[in-house]
Image (cartoon, grey):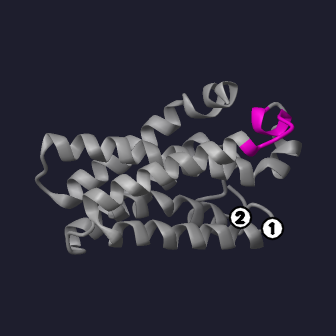
């Protein structure tokens, strides 16, 4: 687990994603306290890390060909990774429930259902698929803003988070077709 964490979690992209979600929630909510900002940071890391692990586990077979050097591919069992992702996600959901209520947790449950369906049905990597997977970041942002009403400010902030995530993906993942038209970059 430590080797996986070093390879996939102690990276600039995880930090950038968590800070992007945090900033999006702060902007979308408007004024906020230091305690709320700290909670947003912690919850953002919970969501980004648990979904990063889940994505790596779901990409394991594909990565056997494209990235055989990755720990998740070389390990015999993904049980500890799945358990870690579940524990982090449940801890985050519990804290989210306590801080923001059921609506926020239901939003994450809906996202999980959509992504689970996508993982089960997807074929080759596509621009639409990458865009769908990046949709998690604005959903995380909105989960941190809810139960505040979905204001134009919150929606605009979530849209900004989504566009920033797409731009980051395009810039940092040479294989990503996120901005492609017709499958080419």
52 to 11, vertically: above or below: below
Q: Is residue 44 left or right of residue 127?
A: left
Q: Residues within 10 Å of mark 1 (few under 14, many from 20)?
A: few
Query: Which residue occupies the foreground of this view, 13 or 40?
Result: 40
Q: Residues within 10 Å of mark 2 (few under 14, many from 20)?
A: some
Residue 12, image x, y percentages: 50, 31
Quarter of the picture containing the N terminus is top right
Q: Is residue 99 left or right of residue 113?
A: left
> In the figure, residue 66 lies in which quadrant?
top right
Identify which residue is drawn at 59% across, 72% down.
Answer: 113
Give residue 126's mark. 2
Q: Are marks 2 and 1 in contact (CB under 8 Å)?
A: yes
Identify which residue is drawn at 76% across, 73% down.
Answer: 121
Identify which residue is drawn at 81% across, 38% down.
Answer: 67
Q: Is residue 105 left or right of residue 3?
A: left
Residue 106, image x, y percentages: 42, 72
User: What segment carries the magenta color?
Assistant: 70-79
Give residue 147's mark. none
- At mark 1, the secondary structure is loop
Quarter of the picture containing the C terminus is bottom right
């Amino acid at each position: 687990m430590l080797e996986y964490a070093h390879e996939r979690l102690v990276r600039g992209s995880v930090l950038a994603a968590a800070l992007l979600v945090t900033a999006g929630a702060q902007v979308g909510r408007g004024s906020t306290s230091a305690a709320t900002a700290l909670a947003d940071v912690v919850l953002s890391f919970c969501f980004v890390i648990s979904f990063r692990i889940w994505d790596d586990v779901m990409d394991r077979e594909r990565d056997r060909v494209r990235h055989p050097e990755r720990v998740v591919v070389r390990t015999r069992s993904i049980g500890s990774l799945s358990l870690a992702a579940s524990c982090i996600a449940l801890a985050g959901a519990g804290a989210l429930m306590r801080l923001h209520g059921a609506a926020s947790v239901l939003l994450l449950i809906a996202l999980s259902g959509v992504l689970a369906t996508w993982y089960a049905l997807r074929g080759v990597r596509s621009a639409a698929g990458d865009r769908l997977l990046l949709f998690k970041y604005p959903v995380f942002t909105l989960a941190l803003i809810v139960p505040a009403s979905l204001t134009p400010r919150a929606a605009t902030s979530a849209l900004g988070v989504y566009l920033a995530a797409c731009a980051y993906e395009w810039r940092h993942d040479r294989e990503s077709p996120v901005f492609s038209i017709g499958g080419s970059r």
